[in-house]
């Protein structure tokens, strides 16, 4: 898979899962990559894989919630490679818990990483991707940015917000005639560590939730996901659904309108462990 020769691509949350697979696929496709994560061990593994391909790589510890550090990082990457073409705002966390039993801090934490992390990354890199003359902002939402389910209010809120923010950005770039494509990514269940890294409201068993995700919900490999995402980036698509599960659920929601809640709620309710 080629098509990114000479491009400089930035991937956050690149120490695991979709971010790691994106970094590796981008390197294989000819890109130079700037990778970051809070998990420096995972990041070092990604760096090794990218180096083995022979692609130029810059690896840094970066917490996407730290705005000042993100702004400084964007300038550093631009200086290091001479330009930045693509930013993949991928870093994310999950949390499970009904609103009634979730703490404010649980909801704020998910918004901080999954929404504000995307805002920080977009704002920090936007001047650079515009200046590149051939830019692209790729923000990772979720199928949970297309419909809500019980127990995922925090994650749903963050991922709906990412979608709203990114869809506005795409239109703004077109109106301003900036040379920047914008893509929102909605993955279905991808076989990554997301559920194992996730937290849950008090009384819920995180291990049980992770097993449920790994066994019943995760369908697509991160490598397949990365290939689908990069194909959409090449085609400058506005929206990409990753996995057949995502496509089926998106169709159901569009056909059912608000009545999807009567279909999905009971199914999720049966799947979710009780407190
Ligand atoms: N796995 C799925 O089924 C799925 C579905 C839809 C959307 N997504 C989204 O895809 C993205 C990647 O998730 P994944 O499935 O690869 O999960 P993952 O847990 O395997 O990888 C996420 C990475 O983000 C990093 N990270 C977490 N908080 C961070 C922070 N504050 N700053 C920097 N890095 C941070 C983690 O250390 C980890 O390496 C996330 O935005 C997630 O919400 C995943």
Image (cartoon, rainbow, N blue to C red):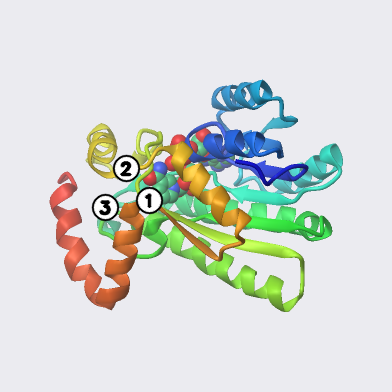
x and y percentages locating residue 18 in the rendered image: 49, 40
Q: Which residue is mark 3?
A: 101
Q: CA distance from mark 3 to mark 2?
A: 29 Å
| Labels 3 and 2: the sequence-earlier one | 3
Label 3 vs label 1, nearer the camera: 1
Q: Quadrant of the C terminus?
A: top left
User: Is 133 placed above or below 60 here?
Assistant: below
Q: Is residue 195 left or right of residue 20?
A: left
Residue beneath the point at 84% across and 37% down? 80
Q: Is residue 210 left or right of residue 49?
A: left
| Labels 2 and 1: the sequence-earlier one | 2
Residue beneath the point at 53% across and 60% down? 184
Q: CA distance from mark 3 to mark 1?
A: 31 Å
Residue beneath the point at 28% across and 40% down? 213
| Labels 3 and 1: the sequence-earlier one | 3
Q: Residues within 10 Å of mark 2 (few under 14, many from 20)?
A: some
Q: Residues within 10 Å of mark 3 (few under 14, many from 20)?
A: some
x and y percentages locating residue 166 in the rendered image: 57, 65
Q: Which residue is mark 1?
A: 243
One can see residue 92 in this view? no
Q: Are circles 2 and 1 on residues that touch, CB within 8 Å? A: yes
Q: Which residue is mark 2?
A: 219
């Amino acid at each position: 898979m080629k098509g990114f020769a000479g491009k400089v691509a930035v991937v956050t949350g690149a120490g695991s899962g979709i971010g790691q697979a994106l970094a590796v696929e981008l390197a294989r496709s000819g890109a130079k990559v700037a990778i970051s994560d809070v998990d420096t061990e995972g990041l070092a593994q990604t760096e090794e894989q990218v180096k083995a391909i022979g692609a130029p790589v810059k690896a840094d510890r970066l917490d996407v919630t730290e705005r000042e550090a993100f702004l400084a990082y964007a300038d550093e990457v631009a200086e290091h490679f001479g330009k930045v073409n693509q930013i993949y705002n991928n870093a994310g966390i999950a949390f499970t818990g009904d609103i009634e039993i979730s703490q404010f801090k649980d909801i704020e934490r998910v918004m901080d990483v999954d929404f504000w992390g995307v805002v920080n990354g977009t704002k920090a890199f936007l001047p650079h991707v515009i200046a590149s003359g051939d830019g692209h902002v790729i923000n990772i939402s979720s199928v949970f940015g297309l419909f809500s389910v019980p127990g995922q209010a925090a994650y749903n809120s963050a991922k709906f917000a990412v979608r709203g923010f990114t869809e506005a950005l795409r239109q703004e770039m077109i109106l301003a005639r900036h040379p920047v494509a914008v893509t929102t990514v909605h993955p279905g269940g991808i076989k990554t560590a997301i559920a194992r890294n996730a937290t849950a409201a008090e009384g819920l068993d995180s291990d049980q939730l992770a097993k449920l995700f790994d066994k019943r919900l995760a369908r697509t490999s991160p490598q397949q996901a990365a290939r689908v995402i990069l194909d959409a980036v090449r085609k400058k698509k506005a929206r990409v659904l990753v996995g057949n599960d995502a496509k089926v659920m998106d169709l159901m929601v569009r056909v059912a309108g608000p009545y999807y809640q009567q279909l999905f709620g009971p199914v999720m309710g049966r799947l979710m462990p009780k407190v």
